[in-house]
Amino acid sequence: MVGLKFPEVQPRYNIAPTQPILCVLNENQQPACVEFSWGLIPSWEKDPAHARRHFNARSETAEEKPSFRAAFKKRRCAILADGFYEWSTTGKTKMPFHMTRADAGLLWFAGLWEPGDNSVGPGNTCTILTTSANDFMIPLHHRMPVILGQHDVPKWIDETNADTDQLKSMLKPCAEDLLTKRQVSQHVNNARHQGPECLSDPPPPPPEQQSLF
């Protein structure tokens, strides 16, 4: 986006709920990139330090839900990432996959944010909107984040945009060929692991036992 400046942040490879994530919003009608705490707390919560946090919000109902409707009207943001994880579960084994854009570009997740006071809670918070999974994602999960087209980002974050039909039209699964996926090591399954090892290849499967007969 023209005029957008990114803050200096350390690369992280396994951002977990409650941690800071990069959000793009309109600030005095200019795009700004800031860090918000992941997990939206509605501004009307009386005890934000202990309030329930909303890490995701269903895009189909966000306009109506009390926790999100004010933010849907006036506090929309785009959350930046270059990839995200989803898991395939077989029995008790969770195998992680890393999703990225096929063209190696940035992902712009549709988000909502709420202001907060970091002296009594986590400060400004945000949530990621989700939608039904497309055919690419459905083998892993029935939901996926809403990924905005770059040309839609300015319209989405414009707090003066009251065209509900236009806004809701953006909240759909992305094109089937937008993403690619790669299985990665189970190292990422531990939220304390934040380094590039999270993207390492999984170990090779053990060799098949040869029959003795």
Image (tube, helix red, strand yellow):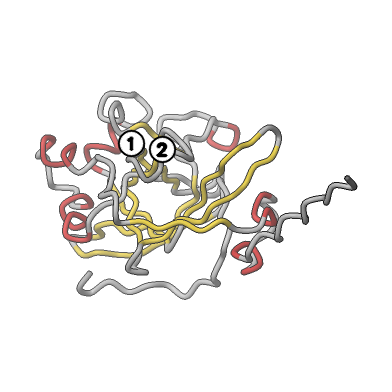
Camera-side residue: 169 or 32? Answer: 169
Q: In the figure, residue 150 lies in which quadrant?
A: bottom left
**Point 59% across, 50% down: residue:** 96
Q: How far apart are marks 2 and 1 (CA)?
A: 12 Å
Q: Is mark 2 on a helix, strand or loop?
A: loop
The crowd level at tag 1 (other Cα within 10 Å; few <14, some 14-19, many 20+) is some
Secondary structure under the numbered disc 1 in the rendered image:
strand
Give residue 131's mark: 1
User: What residue does disc 2 label?
Assistant: 138
Name the residue at 63% across, 66% down.
Answer: 200
| Percent of width and height locating residue 161 | 12, 45
x and y percentages locating residue 59 in the rendered image:
30, 34
**Identity of the residue drawn at 47% across and 35% down:** 54
Q: In which quarter of the image is the N terminus?
A: bottom left
Say which amino acid is labelled 2.
Ile
Displayed quadrant of residue 177: bottom left
